[in-house]
Amino acid sequence: MKAIGYKQAGSLDREDALVDIELPRPSASGRDILVEVEAISVNPVDTKIRKGVSSENGQWKILGWDAVGKVVETGPDAKGFNVGDEVFYAGSLIRPGANSQFHLVDERIVGKKPSTLSNAEAAALPLTAITAWEMLFDRLDIRKPVAGAANTVVIIGGAGGVGSIAIQLARALTDVTVIATASRPETQAWVKELGAHFVVDHSKPLAGQIAALGIGAPAFVFSTTETDKHLKDVVELIAPQGRFGLIDDPEKLDVLPFKRKAVSTHWELMFTRSLYQTADMNEQGKLLNEVARLIDTGKIRTTITETLTPINAANLKKAHATLESGKARGKIVLERF
């Protein structure tokens, strides 16, 4: 089968940073299903791993944690899907990724593809939707108000992949006011289009801009990027007893200043359930099915902004380069091998 991989971690400008390869087609066992991949999307985790993690024992390392495709084989213990089903999912961090023609994935973290979307449109959603959902509803619990605080969530980095779906989920499923941050005219327009009530510029100090809105101190802050840069502002702007969540990887995170306000701090990693085979691992499959329902009923929309064809090393390099530039808006998708 066709696949895209690498062996040595490093910068994207190397010839062997990502290469087209041929690998044996895998077979399904246990609770796995084998999916013929028709579209993939690219996330910051792909670039981080490519730059920092080499393959083991000279084997090819395959990235890719967003896929749409058709089930072609099911393991003996897999009961949730049949051959021919169209599915979407984000996969597991400790298994080969989906940048391959055929991909094995545990059925518990797989959802039925939204019927109203194309393969490319659906591929933009799984990883970011799971991340946003788990942060908003499992970690920050934005459906539970904070006494005396503005019933408001600040989403730092609102125009990125996670921010783009988080805005929509908050609007579709709660009455929480959404403040999104974006710094360029095109990204500010994008987050407004997705439903943000207010937009502030994260290239400038945030606390003063949010105070100037006159709606009070926000109960919740969801930081998707550059947390270390914005942390001092977050400490100032968040309400006492508020809840703060982040998904990026700051070199240092001094949460001691939150103590005075008794602000709780929450990490989100959508791979945790599959990494540790948690007892509630199947919640991700349920979550994706609910996202598909919201899509098919018109409550939320795909966050795709660019499609590259075919799925090959050259196009994957282009997608990685865009993400590394920090200028990405929404999601970049590749389709058809």
Image (cartoon, grey):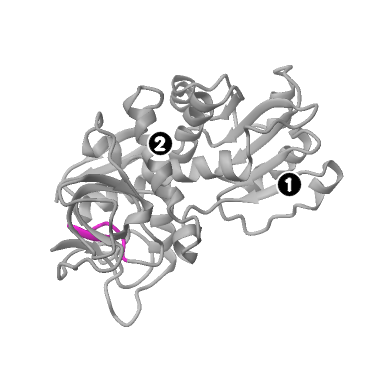
Tell me how many marks there are: 2
* Residue 155, position as x, y percentages in the image: 58, 34
* 172 shown above or below 286: above
Residue 10 visible, this angle: yes
* 314 shown above or below 328: below
* Residue 295, position as x, y percentages in the image: 35, 29
Q: Nearer the viewer, residue 276 or 320?
A: 276
Residue at numbered disc 1:
264
**Closer to viewer: mark 1 or mark 2:** 2
Indicate the amino acid at tag 2.
Glu
Q: CA distance from mark 1 to mark 2?
A: 28 Å
The kind of secondary structure element at disc 1 is strand
* Residue 55, position as x, y percentages in the image: 34, 74
Residue 74 forms part of the magenta stretch: no
The kind of secondary structure element at disc 2 is helix
Task: Write the start and end of the magenta stretch as one range.
Answer: 96-104
Residue at position x 24%, y 65% from top?
Answer: 76
* Residue 66, position as x, y percentages in the image: 33, 49
Residue 200 visible, this angle: no
Residue 290 disc label: 2
The image quadrant of residue 95 is: bottom left
Indicate the amino acid at tag 1.
Ser
Residue 103 forms part of the magenta stretch: yes
